[in-house]
């Protein structure tokens, strides 16, 4: 699960970059087969009300017969009566039915989408003892994208 979580951190950084460049983000799904080959699919539609249910349905039903998948899409959460934007990162290892759902909050400063706090929204109880290690893997993935991007 650690390698999937690392990849999720990397893809989250990629999503934030896309959000900053395009000022919008189409939901996308990345799947991995048993040879660890990646396949990415974007869910572009008329609105998020259509595309987000499609990505969630594809993620949950494992339409691609993948070993693992990562879905990332924009959303809002209500806190203290105020709606705030965040990116949802859903991860699942289909082979052992382990999953994590992470909410990455962000704010807009000087026209840029800046990540703030992230929170664990849901997880498989079988991962409870590994959460600290998985958090490090997630942060390492996000950091590795920044390092790769900075070198280009």
Image (cartoon, rainbow, N blue to C red):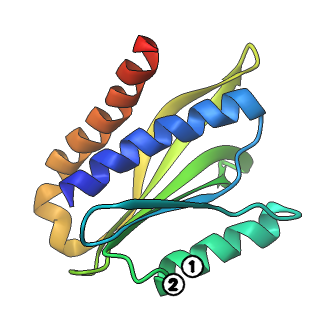
In this rendering, position of residue 45 left or right of residue 151:
right
Is residue 83 rendered to the left or right of residue 39? right
Of residues 116 and 8, which is closer to you in this image? 8
Between marks 2 and 1, how big is the CA–CA gap? 6 Å
Residue at figure coordinates x 17%, y 47% from the top left = 132
**Residue that protrudes farthest toward the left in the picture:** 129
Q: Which residue is mark 1?
A: 58
Q: State the image coordinates of residue 109 (x, y, percent, origin top left).
A: 69, 18
- What percent of the width, then of the height, locates residue 143? 34, 27
**Residue bearing the label numbered 2:** 63
Cβ–Cβ under 8 Å for marks 2 and 1: yes
Residue 129 vertical placement versus 94 (above, below): above
Which of labels 2 and 1 is toward the front? Answer: 2
The relative height of residue 73 versus residue 69 in the rendered view (above or below) is above
Q: Earlier in the sequence, mark 2 or mark 1?
A: 1
| Residue 49, position as x, y percentages in the image | 80, 68
């Amino acid at each position: 699960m650690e390698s999937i979580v690392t990849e999720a951190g990397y893809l989250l950084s990629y999503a934030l970059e896309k959000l900053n460049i395009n000022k919008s983000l189409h939901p996308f799904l990345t799947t991995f087969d048993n040879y660890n080959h990646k396949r990415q699919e974007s869910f572009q539609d008329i609105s998020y009300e259509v595309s987000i249910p499609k990505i969630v349905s594809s993620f949950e039903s494992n339409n691609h017969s993948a070993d693992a998948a990562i879905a990332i899409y924009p959303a809002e959460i209500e806190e203290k009566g105020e709606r705030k934007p965040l990116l949802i990162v859903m991860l699942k290892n289909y082979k052992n039915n382990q999953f994590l759902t992470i909410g990455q909050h962000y704010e807009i400063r000087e026209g840029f989408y800046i990540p703030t706090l992230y929170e664990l929204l849901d997880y498989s109880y079988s991962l409870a003892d590994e959460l600290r290690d998985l958090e490090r893997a997630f942060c390492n993935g996000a950091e590795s994208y920044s390092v790769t991007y900075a070198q280009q």
